Amino acid sequence: MQYDKLNNYLRTYRKKLGLTQREVSFLLGCHGGAKVSRYERAGRIPDLKTIFAYEAIFQKPARELFAGIYDRAERETRRRIRQLVSRLRKRQESPVLARKIAGLRAVVEGGEEELRYAPITDQ
Amino acid sequence: MTDPRDRQLRVLSIDPHPRGFGYAVFEGPLCLVDWGTKDVRQDKERVALERIGELVRRYLPTVIVVEDCAHGKSRRNARVRQLTERILAEARESAVEGHAVPRAAVYRTFAGTGAGTKYGIATALVRAFPELMVRLPPKRKPWQTEDSRMSIFDAVALGLTYFRSLRRAGTARPPDAQLRTVNRRP
C-alpha cells in the first residue's frame, strides 16, 4: 500500500537542523512558537512570504517542504488539464489550438518535454 | 541503496518506557520523518494510547512496530507488556498492520556495527542519523536509571530492524519469520 505524502515536512526539517519552534518563529519574524506549531500540524497554511522564508531556512524547495499539498495540487491540475484538452479538441482546428493542446499534453505526459515555440505563420 | 519497496511504507515504531514512550516515524529506512518522547505521568495506559492515537492520526502509518514483549527473553514489566498488546490491538482496529520485533532481532541487526549494548546501538544510530545527536543522553552509570531519551533510539532501532527483516525476506510484506505479525494485509 502506497502512503500519501504528509501535508508538510516542516517539523522533519526543523528537527534535522536541531531548531526549536521558538527559534524558527524568530527566523520567520513571528512572535512565539504557536504559529510554527500550527504550520507544522497543517492547522494553518503559511502565506507566500513565510513559505519563501521556510525555503531560505531549510534550503529546500516548497514542493518538498509541502509535499502532500503539492502532490494533491499537481494531481488536481493534471485532471483539469485533461478536461481542458478534451474541451479544446471539440473546437475548430487551428495552429494556435494545436500548439495549445500539444503544450498541455506535454504537461500531462510528464512535463519532461520542453515546449518549443515556433513562429506562427498564417496559412 | 534504498529498496523501492521500502518507500511504500510509513512506519511508526513505539517503545514504551516507565514514564511514557519514545517514537520514530520512517518513510523508508533512510528517511526519518519524526522522532521524540511523550511523557505520561498519570493514568498511563489510557493517556499513552491517546497520545499514540494522535500520532497515528497525524502520520497515518502503514505499519506500527513495537517490541515483542511476549518473546521469551523480554524483561519488560507487566504494564509495558500490557500496553504493547493494547497498541497492537488498537492497530488492528484501525486497520494498520502491527508488528512485534523481539529484542534479539534488534541486536542481530546492529551486530555488524559492533554495537552490543543499547548505548552502542544508540551511538551507531547517531552515526547514521546525525540529527539524533542532540537527543543522545550521556552514558548511563550502573547506579543510574535509564534516561527516557533512550526510548527514542530504541524506537528507531525497532523501525530499522523491521525494514531489514523485509529486505531479508525479499518481499514488501512478509517480514522475518521471527517477527510477530498481528494484522497482515492480504
Image (cartoon, coloured by chain):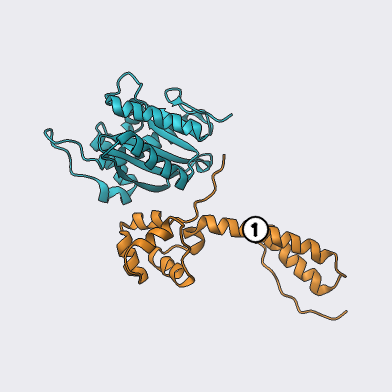
Quadrant in the picture for residue A17: bottom left
* Position above or below: A70 against B49: below
Judged from this view, the residue extending furthest toward the top is B72
* Position above or below: A96 against B125: below
Spot occupied by residue B100 in the image (x, y as percentages of width and height)? 41, 28
- Quarter occupied by the N terminus of chain A: top right
Q: Is residue A63 left or right of residue B48?
A: right
Judged from this view, the residue extending furthest toward the front is B43
Spot occupied by residue A100 in the image (x, y as percentages of width and height)? 75, 70
Identify the residue shown where x is 25% and y is 38%.
B19
Identify the residue shown where x is 31% and y is 44%.
B38
* Position above or below: B79 against B56: above
Packing grade of label 1 (10 A; few <14, some 14-19, many >=20) is few
Of B134 and B88, the residue lying toward us: B88
Which color was chain B given? cyan
Identify the residue shown where x is 53% and y is 31%.
B173
Amino acid, disc 1 = Glu
Spot occupied by residue B152 in the image (x, y as percentages of width and height)? 31, 41
Quadrant in the picture for residue B109: top left
Which residue is the site of mark 1?
A76
Tag 1 subunit = A
Q: Secondary structure at mark 1?
A: helix
Which color was chain A given? orange
Of B141 and B68, the residue lying toward us: B68
